[in-house]
Structures are given as C-alpha cells and as structure tokens.
Image (cartoon, coloured by chain):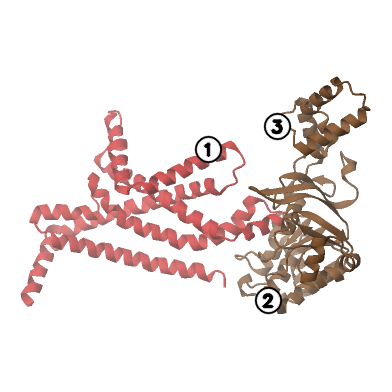
Chain colours: A brown, B red
Amino acid sequence: MKGNDLKYSGSLIQIKGLYKNFGKLQVLKGVSTEIKKGEKVVIIGPSGSGKSTILRCMNLLEVPTYGEIWFEGKLLTPIDPYLHPEIIRLSKTYQKMLVDAESTGDKKPREQVDAEIIAEIKQKDLLKKHEGGEYKSAIKTLYKSNFSDINITRQKIGMVFQHFNLFNNLTVMQNLTLAPVHLKLKSKAQAEEKGMELLKRIGLEDKANVYPSTLSGGQKQRIAIIRALAMEPDVMLFDEPTSALDPEMVGEVLELMKELAAEGMTMVVVTHEMGFAREVASRILFMDDGVIKEENPPKEFFANPKDDRLKEFLSKVL
Amino acid sequence: MSAFFENLWRDFDDCFLSYDYYMLYLKGLRNTMIIAVLASLIGLLIGIITTGIRIAPKNNKIMKVLDGIARLYVTIIRGTPVVLQLFIGYFVIFATMKSFTFFEVKETAGIWVAALVFGINSGAYMSEVLRGGINAVDKGQMEAGRSLGLSWTATFFRIVLPQALKSAIPTMFNEFITLVKETSVAGYVGIIDLMKIQKYITTQNAKLYVPLFIIAIIYLVIVLILQRIQKILERRFARSER
C-alpha cells in the first residue's frame, strides 16, 4: 500500500464526509463511516433518507458531490481537499488568511490560529478552483499515489439490485459467465463450471439455459446474487433486495443472504426487513435526512434507541 | 356493364401494354427502389453515427461539440419538409457542382444526389428510432453491467444494444417503407422515378387517371410485400428471447 496510511486502517470501505446533491436536492449531507472486513452492516431509514444513495456511492454508481470513498486502501473518488488540512495549508486562501491573522498582532499560539483558519475555510467553503501550483500539485500527487481504476475495483464489489437487473438478452448461464469471461478472470469452461456449482447451490441447475423472463422474482434475485458471487467479490452490497418481491418469495432470498453472512462475507444491506437486521447485522445504521443519526449493534439499537426520529421510526415498523 | 370493362381494358392497353409502356414503369420503379435502398443504407450509417455521438458519455469538449452538431442536424432535418431538402440538395449542391466545368456531371447523377438527400433525411429519423430503442432499455441493465466491472462500452455492446435493436429494427424497416413512398417527390427535380412516369404517359396519350391508378397499385403491391417482410422480422426478433 502506497501513500497515506492514515487513510487505511484495515477497513474494507471508508466513507469520508460524503455529500451528494441531485441538482438542488441535497440527498447526503456529510456521511462518514467505515465497513470492516467480515462486518454485516444493515442500513435502515425512511424513504428519501439517502440510504440507497450511500450504498450506490460505495461502488460509484452515484458519484458523490463532495467527500472521499476508499476501498481496500485505494481511492475511488477524486481528492476532496477539505478533508486534508495539509493540502488546505498550501492554498493561497489559507496563506492570505494566515498573513491577515498575524498582522492583527494577536498573540495567539500558532496552532490555534491554524486550526481556526482551517475551520473557517471548511465551514464557509472558501477554497476556489485555482489555489496556486503547490496546492494543485499536492492534490495531484496524493491522487496519483492512491487512485484506482473503478472498473477493476468494481470486480471486488458485488451488487444486488431491487429490480434484479438480470441481463434480459442472455440466458441464466450467460448472465453468470459474461463478466468473468469478458474480463479474462476465468476461461469459459472454468466460468461455466463455477456457474453450475453456484446454480446447484441454490437448486436452480435446471434453469441454466433459460432466459430470465421465464423465472419468478425470487429465482431472479437469487440468480442475481450468485451472478455477483461468480466474481468472487470481497464485499456484497444489497439495495433493498426483497422490496420488489412477492411476500412468499422474500424468504428464499433472505435465506441465501443469511447463508452468505454465515460464511463470513462482508455485507452492506439496505433493507426494510427488521427481522433480518436483528438476526444478521453486526451493526445497524439509521439514516434520516441525509445523515447517519445512529449506529449500534442490533441489541442496543433496538432495545435502547436514543435518537427521537429513530424511536418514532421503530415504533412504526416493529 | 361490359362496355365499362371494355373501356377499362382499352385504357389499360393504351397506358401500360402498348408501345412497351410497361418498360417505362419498370424503369421508374427501378429508380425509385435504387433511391430508397441507397438512401436507407446511407440513413442507417448516419443514424448509427448520430446515435453513437448522442448517447456516448460526454466527458470531454470534443464529445460535447459533436453532440451539439448531431442535435442540430436532427432538429433541422426533422423540422423542414423533405421536398425542400431535396430542392436545396439538388439545385444548390448539384447545380454548383455542374457550374465547375472541370467536373463532368451527367444528367443521371440526379438520382445519386436524390439518394444522398433522402439518406441524410432518413438518418435523422433512424437515429431517433435507434435512440428511442436504446433509451427504452432499463437503466438497471447498464448499472448491473458496470457493477460487475464491465466497462461502459462492453456493457453497451453486449447488453444494451442487442435489446435496443430488438425493438428498433422492425421500426427502422418501417422507415424504409416510408422512404419508398416519400421518394415519389423526386420527380420535382426531374428524376425519373415511378411517380414521374405518369407525366410521360399523360403527355403522350392525354390519359390522366389510368396511369395514376396503375402507379398506385404498383406502390401498394411493393409496400404490402415489404410489410410482410417486416412482420417476419418482428416475429424473428420477438422469438429470440424464449
């Protein structure tokens, strides 16, 4: 690992000061958290709270407006200078403010002046596009030593969607083998062998050569899950995986997800299934109005909620 | 009653069989089909390029400028009548070419100019059909491909485009059928297409209605055959997913 050890503390995914605006609408208003290896993080919250957006930011299906995302010590987003005091110090704005502060003749300690200026710059969003060559090259250097190719990173991040998104023009087996074969991770024979093994695991080996349109919702979602597994990812993201299913099919999908959890897969799950959260989660995040209002292990989370909005939310869904 | 049929037969004889007039119709039909087929090939090519420019990610200036040009092209072509485009294409471009004496331009070149003009016209419509087909493919298909680590290009060509073509190809064939009929205005600029044959025959034997009906029947038969082919295409593409 190169560059900034500070940024990599053994977490699989690190989210730092994330903001996301859709036009004028602020969906995320400063979210920071990290996902450790083996953790099962469940994200709950009312609709419009930003829980799907934060999940989709983790593999850059949504590009955050501000903030940084790190995956296995590699940067997925551009550098956000506001997160790096050492870069802010190189900016013309900072240096000008420093000179101004010193010329007032106050005898404040140097560290305090520094902290005050940085806080003011962050708060008032004072950094401009052009802040001088040193500032620019510091950002460039930091980025160059840490950035990663998003297409390669995504191979390690499996994602399961609410609406399954199986490839309609391909058979089930082609769905499972397209990415591993196209990305030259496996030969066609290897990929098909792995695909068959995964299909057997979910008891759908007889569906290998049919098209997705002939499958039930539950079957589609389980195949979507093993399509992600066929890439042998380090983490699986689930975006409301059971919300579009008939009630009688929810069980089979949750069952497969529980199996994955038991095998030690790192999982981030956006869901409304409180039972699943209680049973499987190692940590639950409650999101509301674009921020994480509370995060705790399930026992504490359900037994002793502190945030008022969470109390209200739980009283409605439990 | 029988007198009516006798008259009809005589008119038909005068306007179709005698003096080998039917060869004239055939010649006109040939020119009509040459213009239509060439124009739809040119249109297909332009349509694919225009669509490519319009849907590709716009992450640099060149793509943005090209996108602007593509939009302008579609807007202008779809916003003006095809006859007007033909007049401009023929009289302005063709005439300018002719005025350069070192260019040996034959009279028959008009048919190629017409094919080009109709092709440029058709390209705008083809691109709208193709783009519509691509936009109709669920956004989740692209997201699923990208989430597996496939590039935009790979996902587009392996997943999105095949699904888009399924709905777009029958509609694009429809464009071709429309084109066959639309080329009937080529006579305005002196091209001898099927429609123009009526004028030739009427000037020779002063019969107006009969050649018009003969031409109508020829167009109708051609279009019915093409619609038949379109139905087969549609069924073919619908079946590929079962």
Q: Which element type, helix, strand or loop, lies under badge 3?
A: loop
**Amino acid at the residue labelled 2:** Asp
Determine the residue positioned at 86% across, 22% down: A102
Q: Which element type, helix, strand or loop, lies under badge 2?
A: loop
Which residue has dot 2 on it? Answer: A246
Q: State the CA–CA distance, disc 2 to disc 3.
A: 50 Å
Q: State the CA–CA distance, disc 1 to disc 2.
A: 47 Å
Q: Is residue A101 visible?
A: yes
Is disc 1 surrounded by few (<14), some (14 to 19) or many (20+) residues within 10 Å? few
Of the numbered discs 2 and 3, the one sitting upstream in the chain is 3
Which residue has dot 1 on it? Answer: B65
Q: Which element type, helix, strand or loop, lies under badge 1?
A: helix
Q: Is residue A137 above or below residue B186?
A: above
Contact between marks 3 and 1 (CB within 8 A): the answer is no
Please identify the quadrant where the N terminus of chain B is shown: bottom left
Q: Using residue A143 as the reference point, say whether residue B11 is left or right of it.
A: left
Residue A119 in the image: state x and y as whole percent: 83, 36
